[in-house]
Amino acid sequence: MRKLIGASLAGLMLVSPALADGKVYVQLPDLSSLHGEGQKDFLRGLILANVISSNCPDFAVTEPEWSLLTDSADLIGRGQFHLNAEAYDQQYFGPAFAVLEDKSACETYGPTVQPILDQLVALGGSREPLPDQDAAYEDWRKMQDEWDAADAAPVGKTKTK
């Protein structure tokens, strides 16, 4: 029994960072064709699909589909709009969660979840986990680090001597 426990613990120590992170990484779509209000509307749809699928059991999604929704939203919200957490919550998540106050929200908005996932797949995303989750994790962290660095960069002119 000790050998089994020891082997299990050793195996857990070798678990990849992606698994330790608790996420499944998928191929993300190319969202560069979205601009202006269309881009904002699409982001609202992604966030609403996330909220509905997470709170309405009849419209739940798989882990890879959840990653496709949330990471695609981050590509726009963080990557293109450079929203910080507070702005993201106020402008997108707050209104999406407010929808849940309506008792018919699940029935009204639930049917929009799969079509938005279909649209993400049509844009090059996937509902299947990437084969190399370790590399996907590293790529995702690198992209988030770039977003964080861009957010921290000074805006405007700086005075030098």
Image (tube, rainbow, N blue to C red):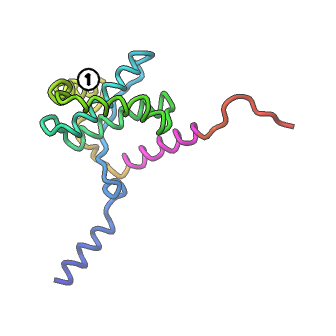
Q: Quadrant of the N terminus?
A: bottom left
Image coordinates for residue 161, horizontal then vertical, percent: 87, 37
Q: Quick check: 4 left or right of 84?
A: left
Left or right for 88, reference 64: right
At 27% from the left and 46% from the top, the residue drawn is: 131
Magenta span contains residue 45: no
Residue placed at 74% from the left, 29% from the top? 157
Residue 99 image position (x, y, % from top left): 28, 28
Mark 1, residues whose alpha carbon is within 10 Å: few (<14), some, or many (≥20)? few
At 24% from the left and 75% from the top, the residue drawn is 7
State which region is magenta.
136-151
Identify which amino acid the numbered label 1 is placed on: Gln
Quadrant position of residue 58:
top left
Q: Is residue 35 above or below residue 93?
A: above
Picture coordinates of residue 80, whole percent (x, y): 48, 28
Residue placed most toward the observer, 98 or 71:
98
Q: Is residue 108 left or right of residue 130?
A: left
User: Which residue is at the front of the view, 138 or 39?
Assistant: 39
Q: Name the residue nearer the viewer: 55 or 23.
A: 55
What residue is disc 1 on? 119
* Image location of residue 28, percent across then percent down: 33, 34
Count of residue discs = 1
Q: Is residue 76 left or right of residue 13?
A: right
Please say if 116 is above or below 67: above
Residue at the far left: name it: 58
Magenta stretch, main secondary structure, is helix
* Image quadrant where residue 51 sits: top left
**Mark 1: secondary structure:** helix
User: Is residue 143 rendered magenta in the image?
Assistant: yes
